[in-house]
Amino acid sequence: LHADLPAVRLDRSLMRQALMNLALNAQQAMPHGGLLEFQTSFDGNQVFLEMIDTGIGMDERTISKMFQAFFSSKSQGSGLGLPTVRKIIQAHGGTVFCESELGQGTRFTISLPAVE
């Protein structure tokens, strides 16, 4: 993690919920174990947090629908986790973006505005 990140305004409880949702999804995508890596960076205006897993990855259909309420690729999924993540991040003035490839894992990038 980057040591000298600028401050961001956030609701600690809501952000914890968003990050826990992403971490739980990563854990479920690695049923036989794997690596979940966190990286942080900034570009002056935005602070970035990346969560990168070595899980099973997602196909294009899943990626295109994953932020829709009640869509889930899991039989036990509610389909509310990722829409909730997006809503929380957007409420903080940020964005969440996903890159994934089947068999290659997934990277979620959260961007939040830095406090000036």
Image (cartoon, helix red, strand yellow):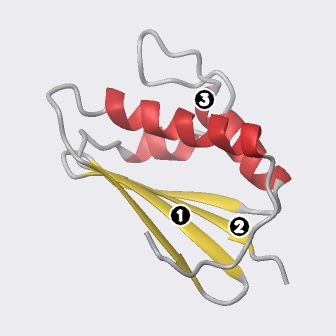
Disc 2 marks a residue whose amino acid type is Leu
Image side of residue 9 versus residue 70, left or right:
right
Picture coordinates of residue 16, whole percent (x, y):
64, 40
Q: Earlier in the sequence, mark 1 or mark 2?
A: 1
How far is disc 3 from disc 1 in space, using C-alphas?
A: 18 Å
Q: CA distance from mark 1 to mark 2?
A: 8 Å
Residue 4 lies, in percent from the top left, at 56, 82
| CB within 8 Å, label 3 to label 1 | no
Secondary element at image label 1:
strand
Identify the residue under disc 3.
81
Near mark 1 (Cα within 10 A), the count class, few <14, some 14-19 or many ≥20, is many
Q: Residue 60, which numbered label?
A: none
Q: Residues within 10 Å of mark 3 (few under 14, many from 20)?
A: many
| Image height of 81 relative to 13, above or below | above
Given residues 97 and 20, the one toward you in this image is 20
Query: What secondary structure is marked by label 2?
Result: strand
Is 101 located above or below residue 42 in the figure? above
Q: Please state which amino acid type lies under the numbered disc 1.
A: Leu
According to the image, label 2 marks what residue? Answer: 112
User: Are dots 1 and 2 in contact, CB under 8 Å?
Assistant: yes
Measured as percent of width and height from the top left, residue 44 is found at 68, 90
Q: Residue at x 44, y 41 (%)?
A: 61
Look at mark 1 in the image and give the residue it sits on. Answer: 49
- Of the 4 image quadrants, the one containing the C terminus is bottom right
Extreme-bottom residue of the structure: 44
Given residues 25 and 70, the one toward you in this image is 25
Disc 3 + disc 2, Cβ < 8 Å = no
- Quadrant where the N terminus is found in the figure: bottom left
Q: Is residue 79 left or right of residue 106?
A: right
Does label 3 or label 1 sit earlier along the sequence?
A: 1
| Residue at the image point whose x is 25% and y is 46% from the top | 102
Q: Mark 2 or mark 3, which is nearer the start of the sequence?
A: 3
